[in-house]
Amino acid sequence: MSDSRLNLFSFTGKTKILHLTWLAFFISFMVWFNHAPLLIVIKETMELTSEQIKTLLILNVALTIPARIIIGMLVDRFGPKRTFATLLSIGSIPCFMFAFADTFEQLALSRFLLGFVGAGFVIGIRMMGEWFPAKQVGVAEGIYGGWGNFGSAAAAMSLPTIALLFGGDEGWRYAVALTGVIALVYAVIYFFSVSDTPKGSTYFKPKRMGAMEVTSKGDLYFYILMSIPMYATLALLTWKLSPSGVSLLEANTATIIYFGITALFAYNIYKIFHINNEHLKEEIPKIHRYKFKQVAILDLAYMVTFGSELAVVSMLPLFFYETFHESHGITAIMAGMLAAGFAFMNLIARPGGGLISDKYGRKKSLTIFLIGLVIGYYIMSQIESSWSLFLAVAVTMLCSFFVQAGEGAVFAMVPLIKRRMTGQIAGMVGAYGNVGAVLFLTVLSFVSPQIFFLTIAGSALFVLVAIQFIEEPKGHMAEVLPDGTVEMIEVD
């Protein structure tokens, strides 16, 4: 198979790696969102309040913020094969915990821990960057992300039926546990079926772990500034769970967590300075520089694309049920199936976004997709019980196309910034997706779904302006081989 052509029906070489890796991500995403289509049944069985359900939604995406940063460092250091296999196997544990929880507190803890599984996305980004050239990396990342993200739709379409097959009020428990079993088995399969790079290629690693390397003092402070929202979001989550919010945490516990977040942020600042201080004493040669603004703008773009997808996928089944239950008589299972349309578009939209980005330019493509996203969410804010189900689903899928195509365009650019730090860059960009999810779901806990959709649209307008300052990747990026020679990697 030549580099100019991608044969998806092949199961050799880089195409084999693509298929095995998107399937790993698919399973991790299915585990991560195995609760969403079953929320109504879980609510009734466990006698939960609406506020507790919303709390579970927020907890599900909270830990993924620091997890994606951590996983990004680990994948750069240890490689995708070991990192993904380990994540899937360990992630099955909180999945089983959630399946057989007896109290809301147990549900909350296991849902919080399951947020770590959502960091699996970062691993495949580095794997695709290693196996595919610049001319194909956008579509490869798009297929990986899009087909993997479809795990949430697969969960929405299959788990309610599986729960019914097991029967009884407790059927949901066995459906959730089954996803954990699948993750555990596939962890073994993946480990023995892939390699981190093509034969003869070098796996470039960061010189140090703990923070990203930047190439100018201005970028050093920009990096610190862009780190603040991640920790602020964790503080926001703590506030939401404190007595000021849903009272899941006691006041003293919340205070301890606030101090912990502050200490973690301070340590992160120390590591950023420590890792960058030495090599920034002298000017970095131009051949080795990259602009951190590229990372920062992609952070924001992913916040409104994937962040909104996470939030909407979490709330859409319940939104459809509450909107159309009385007017159209839809059941909880039907609502889950209809809502799956949003995630269903991942199959074509995200690969399409990557392909269009490869072919017509990264910046132009991302701009067009963000415009469509703004319009899509505005129209979704107008959905009400008088609408036909067909029209509501059609609007949802149209909006979803632009959301997920935008995600594909974002990660078509991520591997083209600095190869040896692709995992860390993907980790930070991915973490911003979860920052967006927590922010949007927090907004949802205070406002109507209509205002929730409008908030996303307004945020995307701001990001649309920021995208105009991103630079199209051109030329080559340089990496140093173990013997000291420089390898030039094409980025356009």
Image (spheres, helix red, strand yellow):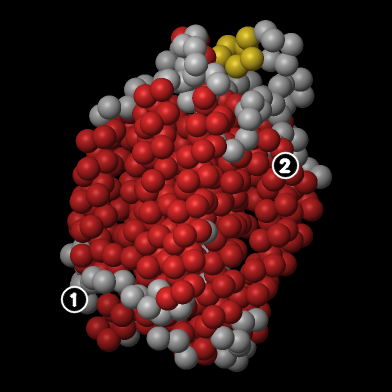
Image quadrant of residue 13? top right
Residue wearing tag 1:
386
Image quadrant of residue 105? bottom right
Percent position of residue 175, x then y: 62, 76
With respect to residue 394, does 481 lie above or below?
Answer: above
Percent position of residue 196, x then y: 71, 34
Question: Which is nearer the eye, 261 or 185?
Answer: 261
Question: Which is nearer the eye, 199 or 217?
Answer: 217
Side (left or right) of 338 relative to 37: left
- Most extreme residue toward the right is 192
How many marks overall? 2
Task: Give the spatial CA distance, label 2 vs label 1.
Answer: 50 Å
Question: Which is nearer the eye, 420 or 25?
Answer: 420
Are there few (<14), some (14-19), or many (20+) residues within 10 Å of tag 1? Answer: few
Give the number of the mark in front: 2 or 1: 2
With respect to residue 484, does 121 lie above or below?
Answer: below
Question: Which is nearer the eye, 438 or 273?
Answer: 273
With respect to residue 48, does 68 lie above or below?
Answer: above
Q: Which mark is residue 81?
A: 2
Q: Which mark is residue 135?
A: none
Side (left or right) of 87 relative to 346: right
Q: Secondary structure at mark 2?
A: helix
Image quadrant of residue 81? top right
Q: Is residue 252 visible?
A: yes
The amino acid on which the numbered mark 2 sits, given as a three-letter code, is Lys
Quadrant location, the N terminus: top right
Percent position of residue 440, x then y: 32, 60
The amino acid on which the numbered mark 1 sits, given as a three-letter code, is Ser
Side (left or right) of 27 relative to 239: right
Percent position of residue 247, x then y: 41, 80
Side (left or right) of 187 relative to 457: right
First in sequence, mark 2 or 1: give its number.
2
